Amino acid sequence: KNQVEQSPQSLIILEGKNCTLQCNYTVSPFSNLRWYKQDTGRGPVSLTIMTFSENTKSNGRYTATLDADTKQSSLHITASQLSDSASYICVVSGSVTDDYKLSFGAGTTVTVRA
Amino acid sequence: DAGVIQSPRHEVTEMGQEVTLRCKPISGHDYLFWYRQTMMRGLELLIYFNNNVPIDDSGMPEDRFSAKMPNASFSTLKIQPSEPRDSAVYFCASSFISGLSPGEQFFGPGTRLTVL
């Protein structure tokens, strides 16, 4: 069973609207959680990296939250733009000694329509 | 900086042939990663290096796969012999860790491999 579950699998929103993506994980111990944006045909681009002591982190119109107690994270996109159409991948590092012992979610595909 | 450079961008080969993928990390980065991405399995970490030394290759699928990093500016991922199930997009990424903060990974554009 995948240790990182993302929902929804895909969603369609109208330009200018907000949306929230979810990431639940069972990885333990926990070191950090990353959100990546991947445009079609491109490599993933890092949006945020949060350690266990951080509850929220923003990158422009993207805001990530983390609840290490419930092992849940969310990525909120504000005032969506057509360029936000992409796949968003949640990645969890499960080792405090090996930062790159990573578990990957399957991603949420976001489509923004005019 | 040009970012992470990968070559070739596309590779089509026949089953049984040797395939070599190349990567040039961002200058000054001391970590290099090889990933594979498919629709079925998503993004998978194959192997990563620190200061040119392989640290974790537990993600390498089998002995047909090998990776080398002869110097700080070049790495290869080789598949010999290739099989149709190796068809995927292969990404290289590099990172630099400063202090205790986790390093942000910078991905290359990927190599789309098709094995017929």
Image (spheres, rainbow, N blue to C red):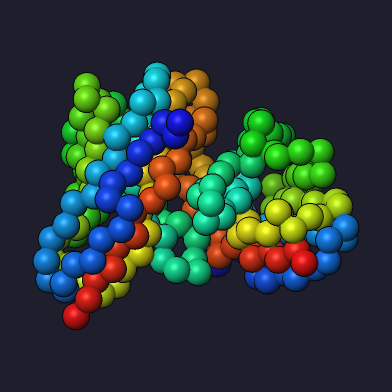
Q: Position of residue A100 (x, y in %)?
A: 51, 33
Determine the residue positioned at 28% across, 68% down: A111
Determine the residue positioned at 64% across, 41% down: B46
Extreme-bottom residue of the structure: A114
**Residue A98 visible here:** yes
Q: Position of residue B115 (x, y in %)?
A: 75, 63
Q: Position of residue A60 (x, y in %)?
A: 21, 58
In terms of image quadrants, where is residue A23? top left
Q: Nearer the viewer, residue B97 or A2?
A: A2
**Residue A58 visible here:** no
- Tell whether B80 sits left or right of B74: right
Determine the residue positioned at 81% across, 38% down: B63
Image vertical order of residue B61 relative to residue B10, above or below: above
Q: Total number of numbered labels?
A: 0
Q: Nearer the viewer, residue B51 or A29?
A: A29
- Tell whether A86 sits left or right of A42: left
Q: Nearer the viewer, residue B20 or A11?
A: A11
